[in-house]
Image (cartoon, rainbow, N blue to C red):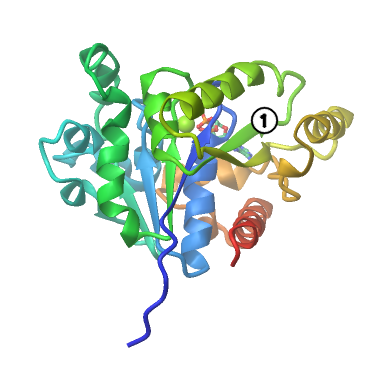
Amino acid sequence: MVTREIMGKIIAIANQKGGVGKTTTTANLGASLGQLGKNVLLVDFDPQGNLTTGFLGSAKTIIQKDVTDALTKQVPVKNTIIKTKFENVSILPAASNRLATIETEYANVEGRELLLKDILDQVKDTYDFIFIDCPPSLGMLSIQAFTSSDTVLITLQSEFYALEGLSQLLNTIDQVRRRSNPQLGIEGVLITMYDARTLLGAQVIGDVRNYFYNKVYDTIIPRNIGLAEAPSHQMPIYYYDSRSKGAIAYIELAKEVLQANGN
Ligand SMILES: Nc1ncnc2c1ncn2[C@@H]1O[C@H](COP(=O)(O)OP(=O)(O)OP(=O)(O)O)[C@@H](O)[C@H]1O
Ligand SMILES: [Mg+2]
């Protein structure tokens, strides 16, 4: 029997700004790494549950147990993970917006920032990569995600305001480093929804590179209609249209992530 080392790396995909490509990146970077032979778990940690809808569609409504049940220890986390039909990809779904209630119900509970870490520690050794799709806020859920993670991957939409609000995100990461997770690193910065036809796009890339230097991925995700359509067919882009620019970009990104992690 061939055994190989499991990486067990946990990466939070974050930006408190809405609609900057977090969920699209979680789904498609995850599926691309699966395609490249890595065992991947995707964690839907956004009460909106977009990641779950993008994989399961209407079947989401019949899910009995989800990430909230695991967090609140109603059910062992292993019983809430669903293997998808896509190669090497499993999902820990957020099937109801009960996840939102965690913020308030646990507001004064000691150790609340460790809830997610506690459950991911139980399955970490099963996966090469675990990606956490963060919500568009810097509240308790994002703090839990950062506390659980080895690194944070920041997505930035290619637009004039791309860098606005970033200092809040970086402050939150620093705060988590000081309080509970000193090793937390920045995995990389990904520019999404890039439109090569606009001068603005090129300017944004320049600004982001000036700010983050070599933390910015060479791979830039273009604006691509397939990426927006694929979730409505419950497919990652690679399975929906493997020759699209979006599919090619996410495979390239996956290779870059592998290389940065010594593969
Ligand atoms: N590269 C792209 N090209 C075209 N459309 C895209 C691209 N990336 C994302 N989209 C679309 O833009 C919208 C926002 O993307 P996405 O849901 O990934 O962002 P998000 O950061 O997860 O949003 P939220 O903050 O609400 O969770 C979605 O409709 C998605 O399909
Ligand atoms: Mg999202």
Residue pointed to by mark 1: 157
Relative placement, left or right, of 71 versus 86 is left
| Residue at the extreme bottom of the image, as rendered | 1
Tell me residue 21's x, y (percent). 57, 35
Tell me residue 60's x, y (percent). 26, 40
Asked whether the viewer can see residue 216, the reply is: no
In this view, the residue in front, 161 or 233, is 161
Quadrant housing the N terminus:
bottom left
The image shows residue 40, relative to residue 91, as above or below, that is: below
Tell me residue 183's x, y (percent). 51, 40
Which picture quadrant has residue 72? Answer: top left
Amino acid type of the residue tagged 1 in the rendering: Gln
Q: Residue at x 66, y 44 (%)?
A: 224
Relative placement, left or right, of 198 versus 71 is right
**Mark 1 sits near ligand 1, with its Cβ under 8 Å away:** yes
Relative placement, left or right, of 197 versus 29 is right
The image shows residue 254, relative to residue 148, as above or below, that is: below
Q: Residues within 10 Å of mark 1 (few under 14, many from 20)?
A: many
Q: Residue at x 61, y 55 (%)?
A: 257
In this view, the residue in front, 85 or 57, is 85
The image shows residue 18, relative to residue 31, as above or below, that is: above
Tell me residue 225's x, y (percent). 62, 42
In this view, the residue in front, 245 or 9, is 9
Q: Residue at x 64, y 54 (%)?
A: 253
The image shows residue 43, relative to residue 83, as above or below, that is: above
Quadrant housing the C terminus:
bottom right
| Residue at the extreme right of the image, as rendered | 199
Mark 1, secondary structure of its residue:
strand
Q: Residue at x 22, y 17 (%)?
A: 109
Asked whether the viewer can see residue 146, the reply is: yes
